[in-house]
Amino acid sequence: MPRAEFDICVVGGGAAGLAVAADGASMGAKVVLVEKDGLGGDCLRYGCVPSKALLHCAKVAQTMRRAERFGISPCTPEVDLAAVMERVQRVIRAIEVHDSPERFRALGVEVVSGHGRFVDPATLVVNGREITARDFVLATGSRAAVPDIPGLKQVPYLTNESVFSLRKQVPSLIVLGGGPIGVEMAQAFSRLGSRVSLVNRSPQILPNEDSDLVSVVADRIRAEGVNLYQGYSSLRVDRQDGTIRLLVAAPGGSEQVLEASHLLLATGRQPNVDDIGLEQAGVAMLRGRIMVGPSLRTSNRHIYVCGDAAGGHQFSHVAEHHAGVVLKNILFHLPAKVEERVIPWCTFTDPELARVGLSEREARQSDIAHRVYTFPFTDIDRAQTDDETDGFVKILVTPGGHLLGAAIVGPHAGELIHEYALAMAEKVRLSSLSGMLHVYPTMAQINRRVAQAYRKESLTPGVKKWIKRLFFLRGQLNETATGEI
């Protein structure tokens, strides 16, 4: 059998594929990267980067409306959506230089533009060229799932791939889907002046999170004008005189017609695994998804899959983690597996909602012994100075004092959650977190304050009496004092 041309062939130039290609080449592997559209993938062009740029523009508009909180005269912003979206594109252009073909070629990676398709278990054909490699990595990403709603094929709709191409103002918008993408976009367009209705089949937006945390986000976006239709199913859609009409059914069965100028689909993602010759490659599939184990190896022992194409958590940081697992298996033959226990994530609404580890609902469903401690942002001085007091931190702790999970709904939750992710990864006891010094005044002090709630629980009145006797203390015990400053 002839020797393979490359050590690694990466198919797909998104977050996972770029990480495999760059790190593999830096280790001395001969790498080829195949991408049919452009390097950077969904995250750069249609996902994380443009959505966060849009959310920031929307937050500026909302701050202008509510400037009286800071002693500044409020005003109604005049939103130029074309200018907003051009600003989004400028952000993309500023970041995409890090994902350019020139940069990867300088790293030693051969970059091939075109659609790749397997013709046998060890050969990928791109533009008529046969590429052989010792190992292949499928990092083909995902795309917006299109629900099966009668009439949808006859109606213009937006997805994450087209919404950032808008240049004219959106008078009204129906968002289908109450996951992170749907909720983020609903709030953003509402703040940019659109009348927004969000329709969600689940009785709760952000259904993977605890209801007490979600209610903070739901209350905020309702207050800002987003109409929530939770537990509603979509029955039919059509378009009359330029207006999109969506027939929905309420949880009780009553029907209602929602009207808007635009429709955005945010009903989940599906992996891009079509027309790449997986059958010829000997890669097993199950219900449209690649069958893959914790090592990310497919049924073909020389083909791995990572990122959104692997299923599971669809985040860019998870895709990069997948890349590390794949490279350890390919280059060093280590039995590396995907980390499932400590994966942080964040929904970038305002306020943000972030979590790592188990939710309270998951712990109860699994009958895991735990205690719950919470602390509100209203009692954090920096939250008061910045007028960002909505939300709280909730931690789940084992009887022995180790973290099972942490969730934050509030300002900068996506930044604050990493302290808990590190504590869980390193199995740090909560007592250590409660003793850690935090700069005053910062939002991060909330992490110490909620940890102190666990420590103080052990200081029962009986324990305090023994301390008083042991150290000959002469003060009066106050049973209700917390000792917090």
Image: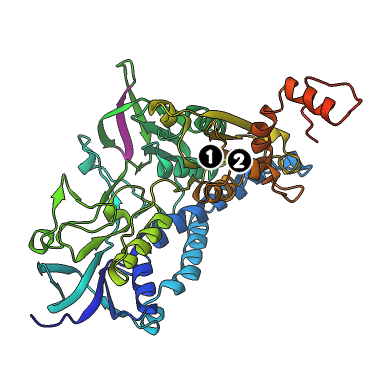
Disc 1 and disc 2: Cα gap in Å?
7 Å
Question: Horizontal placement of 299 versus 95: left or right?
Answer: left
Find out whether the residues at labels 1 and 2 contact each other: C-beta distance under 8 Å: yes
Residue 455 seen in this snapshot:
yes
**Residue beneath disc 1:** 403
Where's residue 237, x and y in %? Answer: 26, 34
Residue type at mark 1?
Answer: Leu
Residue drawn at x 33%, y 29% is 201
Q: Which residues are magenta?
A: 241-249
Q: Which mark is first along the chain, 2 or 1? A: 1
Q: Who is closer to the viewer here, 192 or 413?
A: 413
Residue drawn at x 50%, y 29% is 370
User: Which mark, by number, is residue 430?
Assistant: 2
Residue drawn at x 35%, y 54% is 338
Question: Horizontal placement of 38 versus 77: left or right?
Answer: left
Circle 2 — which element? Answer: helix
User: Which mark, by number, is residue 135?
Assistant: none
Q: Is residue 232 above or below residue 172?
A: above
Q: Who is closer to the viewer here, 178 or 317?
A: 317
Q: Who is closer to the viewer here, 75 or 236?
A: 236
Examine the image and state in which quarter residue 264 appears.
top left
Residue type at mark 2?
Answer: Leu
What is the chief secondary structure element of the magenta stretch? strand
